[in-house]
Amino acid sequence: MTSPNASPNPHVLGQSSIFNPQVINDIHTKAELGRYRMRGFSMFKPIPHWDQLMFMPGTLTRFVIEGYREKCDTKTVLGARFAQKPLELDIPVYITGMSFGALSLEAKMALAKGASMAGTATCSGEGGMIPPERDLSTKWYYQVIQSRYGFNPHHLMLADAIEFFIGQGCKVGLGGHLMGQKVTEQVAEMRSLPAGIDQRSPARHPDWLGPDDLSLKIQEVREATDYQVPIQLKLGAARVYDDVRMAAKCGPDIIYLDGAEGGTGAGPHLATEETGIPLMAAIPEARRALEDVGLADEIDLVVAGGIRNGGDIAKCIALGAKAVAIGHSSLMALNCNKELPGITDYEGTLGVKAGSCYHCHTGRCPVGITTQDPELRKRLDVEQGAERVYNFLHTLTLEVQMLARACGKTDVHSLEPEDLCALTTEAAAMARVPLAGTNYVPGVTEERTLHEIKTLLEKHVANDGGGSRDV
Amino acid sequence: MVAMSTRRSRNDIRGLAEPDVEAPKTARIEGDTAVFDAADLSPRQINLELRRLVYGEQIPEVTIENPGAKHSVAVGILTRCRITIDGSVGYFGATLGDGPEIHITGRVGWSVAENMMSGVTVIDKNAGSLTGAAMRGGDLVIRGHVGARTGIDQKGGTIIVGGNAGALTGFMMQRGRQIICGDAGPGMGDSMYDGAIYVGGAVASLGVDCVEAEMTPEDDELIDRKFRIYGMDRPASFRKFVCGKKLWNYDNLEPSERKLVL
Ligand SMILES: Cc1cc2nc3c(=O)[nH]c(=O)nc-3n(C[C@H](O)[C@H](O)[C@H](O)COP(=O)(O)O)c2cc1C
Ligand code: SF4
């Protein structure tokens, strides 16, 4: 018998953790809609994340670097492999590709200005170039995406780097989405589409299919841009080891890996929850792949997905990333999910409290970021937004430097896996760093032990001259 | 100089990257025209020579001999000029252009005239798949047959095919026109958003959300005009296919997804 005190009603047995109220509501909604549900934002379900890794800074075994007084370099050069002009960033963080269409003009401009103030880059995203963004960005990626919406060779020539979108972590294997509410006349015209349609972009590129053709596509774009700027391939993290090996053989300068935690402006909820692998698992796989094809020193690795603070960035770098791109956290610097007294009413307009908003896909963003509505857009001031983006990027850099100095590094890029330990066996296995307080790296330790046993056995057999012995 | 000092080793597994090459300067220039032999040139050398001529020397008419089916030839030319390629080219021929008139006397591989903005590209023989992918403007004329997915993601301009077209012609086409004189393969016009496909021969099958529409006198006038320009024989009649507009929007929206009225 259970204690009658445990529940307000002693006759209630309990409730299903599988069919919880949210799941039941979801089924009710789908039964009415007859289609998958869309949303923006990040992953909802908990997965192994950066919180499960810790730094092991210098004590007596390692020499620490004096904060505030001794230098800790943050300069980040990307794509020096074949490009005449590699991308030189002052900090190891930049603003990822988020399309004009998904974002408002003001958001694109504020991100561009804030990034330039911090000495770093932005990226066009899917919908083509908007001149104010290009003007305000001192370093600018132009995206070659499946849909080629608004793709223009004149704009290609203005790029400081070119990113081929092959996939994104949040919805690996799917193309972009933009709901009809956001496909205004202007957005539609830029994309050569009818206004107001629910735009579901292609998942495959129109002019190449597999890695062999991709190699030629890269050659084409290099020819068109005269080998001036780096070529980056953006992959959603899934079968990372094999995908990165293949990507590397296609000849890029940079590979960008987007973890399953990555955000979106609009995507099927199910895809955001159920596709891809965590970034923490992806980075070591990518490093292993690059080392195995002998290109670890040539191709730079950029990573993204669920990055919140300098700790996350430092961990990415320690595992082998050269730079980190941020999406939704930069939108938070622009006020995403913040109640502005007297201006916003999250609950009244979207039915959720500020802090729980994921409604970017609706075009009704209360703070003017992911909307095309002229009234909502007025709520985002470009100058103030840019200042906050700059402050955030600057803070991220200070945080990375702080951790790097504590680990004894005079350059943030010197952070290494040896600086990390894991709090759970899962994180240890994925990130391939030891479980805290032990030497145990799941998978790696066992492999090493097996190898030792094999070597011992081989020696034993050799000493025994074949091992046949009368008993 | 800074860039040079940060550069690392160059180990391109596929052997396609050619970063440190200079224009061979082998063209014979006579007045307003130039000719060069591409037999011993790499794609990079061909493009550097071509660019030197049309941009540097301002020569409006260039002929490339012996292109040898090389890939990525005559890409990214953003000025008005006339280029004759005397032979066949490989993948990504005459792509990313805005303005040039390009005449290829042989065959072409995949993705010819990809993302062309304006100008004219004429191919005398057959073209591979993905012909005119994501094309945005101008005329692309293939006198022979074309492979699959011609005009995939096409955003503007006109593609004219003298022969037959393969499967999924006009897949996800957004705007513009395709005029196919011969037969079209299965799945034609699949998921097209807009635009029109005219077919003179038989259509194996239509793709999702592609429907037949009435030919109008304007349609016939356009086709006549294009055929006159390129000196092509016009089939007696054409059928016209357009988007059924059934896939434009999700059938149903959640309350928060409906259009906001402030
Ligand atoms: C509003 C929004 C729009 C996006 N648009 C694009 C896009 O146009 N192209 C693209 O490659 N990725 C796009 N993404 C994905 C981001 O580039 C990136 O992969 C992801 O946001 C990284 O995860 P994070 O948001 O957790 O930092 C978008 C993301 C957001 C939040
Ligand atoms: S506040 Fe705006 S940007 Fe943030 S989740 Fe909501 S709709 Fe998206």
Image (cartoon, coloured by chain):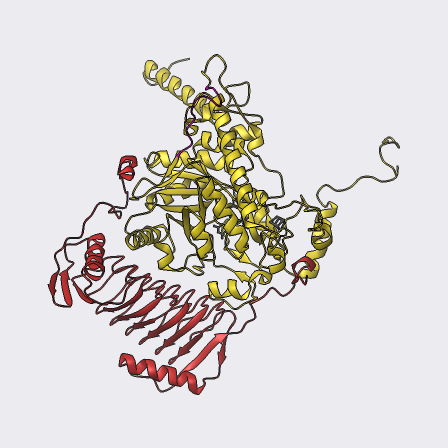
Chain colours: A yellow, B red
**Residue sitting at 50 percent across and 25 percent down?**
A403
Q: Position of residue A312 (x, y in %)?
A: 53, 33
Residue A278 visible in the shown view: no
- The range drawn in magenta is A65-75
Extreme front residue here? A383
Q: Quadrant of residue A116?
A: top left
B255 vs B10: above or below? below
**Residue sitting at 55 percent across and 55 percent down?**
A104
Q: Can you say which quadrant of the picture contains the C terminus of chain A?
A: top left
Q: Can you say which quadrant of the picture contains the N terminus of chain A?
A: top right
A401 vs A174: above or below? above
Residue A374 visible in the shown view: yes
Q: Nearer the viewer, residue A171 or A332?
A: A332
Q: Is residue A72 magenta?
A: yes
B223 vs A416: above or below? below
Q: Of helix, strand and loop, which mostly describes the magenta segment? A: loop
Q: Position of residue B155 (x, y in %)?
A: 42, 67
**Residue sitting at 60 percent across and 60 percent down?**
A374
Left or right of B102 in this view: A90 = right
Report the number of discs. 0
Q: Nearer the viewer, residue A193 or A2?
A: A193
Q: Position of residue B105 (x, y in %)?
A: 21, 69
Q: Quadrant of residue B32?
A: bottom left
Q: Nearer the viewer, residue A98 or A19?
A: A98
Left or right of A184 in this view: A211 = left
**Residue sitting at 56 percent across and 37 percent down?**
A308
Left or right of B260 in this view: A324 = left
Q: Is residue A193 magenta?
A: no
